[in-house]
Image: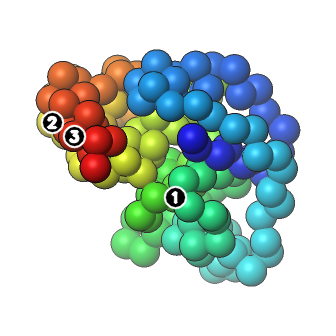
């Protein structure tokens, strides 16, 4: 089971469906979680993704409406650390794109790494790249995922 938090009310239907389809796990609407101002970097005018991830409980994902960063990158769509992740919908133009980035980060939560195949686990640092990749796992990642879930 995976918990979903959000910083502002959003439609979860498509996101939940995409998670169930790719991972076969159930999703729990964990409700609103406001972003602490402590996570804001005044010079970058962005929120620190690693800090946001660090305050989450295990096996949860947090969809935030603010721009987020990690060191040495202009921005990130999302970040996963161990079994928790954050996704920013700030630069994502549709529910489908939010669902796609959520599936990518959930893949990391379950131990998947970046993938070069036609696969949602492709790394993307631009909207064009993110748009191009499919919203599903390739066969190789599916096999890895099955092994991870059996552990
Ligand atoms: Zn990634
Ligand atoms: Zn893959």
In the displayed structure, 53 sits above or below 151; it is below
Q: Residues within 10 Å of mark 1 (few under 14, many from 20)?
A: many
Viewport quadrant of the N terminus: top right
- SS for callout 2: loop
Q: Position of residue 132 (x, y in %)?
A: 34, 23
Left or right of residue 76, residue 42 in this image:
right
Mark carried by residue 27: none
Q: Is residue 57 visible?
A: yes
Quarter location, residue 86: bottom right
Q: In the image, is the residue at mark 2 within 8 Å of ligand 2 by its beta carbon?
A: yes
Q: Nearer the viewer, residue 3 or 115?
A: 3
Q: Earlier in the sequence, mark 1 or mark 2?
A: 1
**Could you tell me if the residues under marks 1 and 2 are in contact, i.e. CB atoms within 8 Å?**
no
Q: Residues within 10 Å of mark 2 (few under 14, many from 20)?
A: few
Q: From the image, tell me which residue sits under label 2.
A: 116
- SS for callout 3: helix
* Camera-side mark, 3 or 1: 3
**Could you tell me if the residues under marks 2 and 3 are in contact, i.e. CB atoms within 8 Å?**
no
Left or right of residue 139, residue 107 in this image:
right
Which residue does the image show at 56% across and 61% down from the upper left? 58
Q: From the image, tell me which residue sits under label 3.
A: 147
Q: Position of residue 127 (x, y in %)?
A: 44, 35
Q: Earlier in the sequence, mark 2 or mark 3?
A: 2
Mark carried by residue 84: 1
Q: Position of residue 141 (x, y in %)?
A: 22, 33
């Amino acid at each position: 089971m995976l918990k979903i938090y959000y910083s502002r009310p959003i439609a979860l239907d498509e996101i939940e469906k995409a998670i169930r389809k790719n991972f076969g796990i159930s999703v729990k609407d964990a409700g609103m979680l406001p972003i602490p101002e402590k996570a804001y970097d005044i010079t970058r005018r962005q929120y620190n993704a690693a800090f946001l991830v660090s305050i989450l409980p295990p096996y949860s994902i947090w969809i935030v409406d603010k721009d987020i960063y990690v060191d040495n990158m202009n921005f990130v769509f999302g970040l996963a650390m161990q079994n928790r992740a954050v996704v920013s919908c700030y630069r994502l133009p549709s529910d489908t794109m939010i669902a796609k980035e959520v599936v990518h980060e959930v893949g990391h939560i379950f131990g998947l790494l970046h993938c070069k195949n036609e696969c949602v686990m492709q790394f993307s640092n631009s909207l064009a790249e993110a748009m191009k990749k499919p919203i599903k796992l390739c066969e190789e990642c599916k096999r890895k995922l099955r092994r991870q879930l059996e552990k």
